Amino acid sequence: MDGSQLDFAQIRAQFPILQQTENGQPLVYLDGGATSQKPLQVIEALDRYYREQNANVHRGVYGLSERATELYEGARETSRQFLNAKSIKEIVFVRGTTEAVNLVAHSWGLANLKAGDEVIVTEMEHHSNIVPWQLLRDQLGIRLNVLRMNDRGEICLNALKSQMSEKTKLLAVTHMSNALGTINPVKEMTEIAHSFGAKVLVDGAQATPHMTVDVQDIGCDFYALSGHKMYGPTGIGVLYGKEELLDVMPPYQGGGDMIYSVTFEKTEYNVLPYKFEAGTPHISGAIGLAEAMKFMQSIGLDRIAAYEASLLKYATEQLKTIEGLRVIGEAEHKGGVISFIIEGVHPHDMATLMDQDGIAVRASHHCAMPVMQHFNVPATIRASLGVYNNKSDIDRLVASILEAKEMLL
Ligand code: PMP
């Protein structure tokens, strides 16, 4: 078995939802970019937690609470290993990528930025990595600069170099674009940003389901991920931050678990990473996320990447045989996302008809409206691949498009 081959039948069998039909047709799920489906391993861990292990964490002295704490903290260690962070102090559990970016904007941003400072975001960012910086711009008077992409959907490193200056304090960049599939050279971008003294936040929402991520190798200061995009539950994610930065950042929210002691005069905050985890955390979510990471590791992240690369190649070739179909986003380095439009057909009409064939694709601006503006389209149809998809899913996608096109044109 070479790197691009998987024991596909065995993997697919682990996703109960994919055994069901939609509108009388076997479900073809091609919307992992919005949220992935969940393997039995994750579903069973959640079930087991609520049947046998549920208690609040950290403060209980009884066995059940201690075991729940062990599982929750074990999930932190699994996340540390998954990202290759140096320490569990650098792993903060959050609701997802959106909350992670807002945490950095609010805590690091408010403490470190002042009027006239610059934050650079790329033109292909998800709204979650644009709007928090706009809120900060309006609050602090910082400048938000946009690093443009070319018409293939790629960022040019020289353009980044020429846009950086000593005023740039942060580069906020997506590792993989949800609307285009572009995988950005975040390691090289981090080196450039650091050479100007700026910090780097990487939005890893789309990258973590598809490839090995090593935050020490990338060298970034912050890295955000969402559990639900990577075969885990909704409502849980990770903010990785370098310990020396998190250590001096003020808390993001106040409440239980983030405190060491409270009087009405003064509160002392807890140590890392608890300083950033106010309130009862999403315990089952963290446990489910860890299980999802183990699921991916048991297949092998590099093997997943190779498998999806060959599927992406097949899908792109097949889709391009359709007359009037234009692929949006043709970066040389791409992950398993294909955005496209079909001349004369509105993406929403097409996707609605495809649903009748049991095909789940997204027709939207994908929360990346500036990307749509760049390509001068209102929306695209997006097929996003996961480890549970295969060539037969792609064949059904193509057949369904051809059929829908006949009806709409
Ligand atoms: N960034 C990217 C690139 C995304 O694809 C998404 C989700 N579509 C987000 C951020 C936001 O993630 P979440 O909704 O899980 O917070």
Image: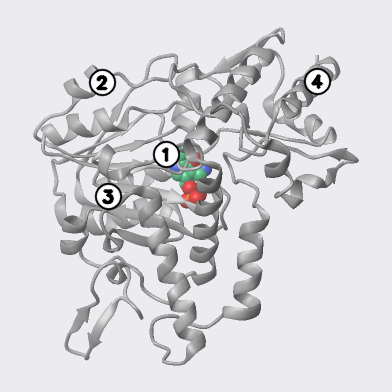
Q: Distance of mark 2 from mark 1, alpha carbons?
A: 22 Å
Classify 10 Å Cα crowding around label 1: few (below 14), some (14-19), many (20 and above). some
According to the picture, the residue beneath numbered tag 3 turns out to be 136
Mark in the foreground, 1 or 3? 1
Q: Position of residue 221 (x, y in %)?
A: 24, 46
What residue type is disc 2 on? Leu
Residue hosting label 1: 212
Q: Secondary structure at mark 3?
A: helix
The numbered mark at residue 157 is 2
C-alpha separation, residue under disc 2 versus residue under disc 4: 39 Å
Query: With 390 as the anchor, is 253 left or right in this view?
Result: left
The span from disc 4 to disc 3 (Cα, nearest Å) is: 47 Å
Nearer the N terminus, badge 2 or badge 1?
A: 2
* Residue mark closest to the camera, 2 vs 1: 1
Name the mark nearer the viewer: 2 or 3.
Answer: 2
Q: Is residue 315 above or below residue 164?
A: above
Given the image, on which type of amino acid does mark 1 rest?
A: Thr
Q: Does dot 1 land on a helix, a strand or a loop?
A: loop
Q: Pointer 4: what residue?
A: 399
Is residue 42 positioned above or below 35 on the image? below
Query: Please, what is the three-letter code of the amino acid marked with disc 3?
Result: Leu
Q: Are marks 2 and 3 in contact (CB under 8 Å)?
A: no
Vertical order, 40 against 346 (above or below): below
Instruction: State the residue at coordinates (15%, 53%).
Output: 112
Q: Is 136 located above or below residue 5 in the figure?
A: below
Element type at mark 4: helix
Image quadrant where one finds the N terminus? top right
Q: Quadrant of residue 87?
A: bottom left
Mark 3 vs ligand 1: CB below 8 Å: no
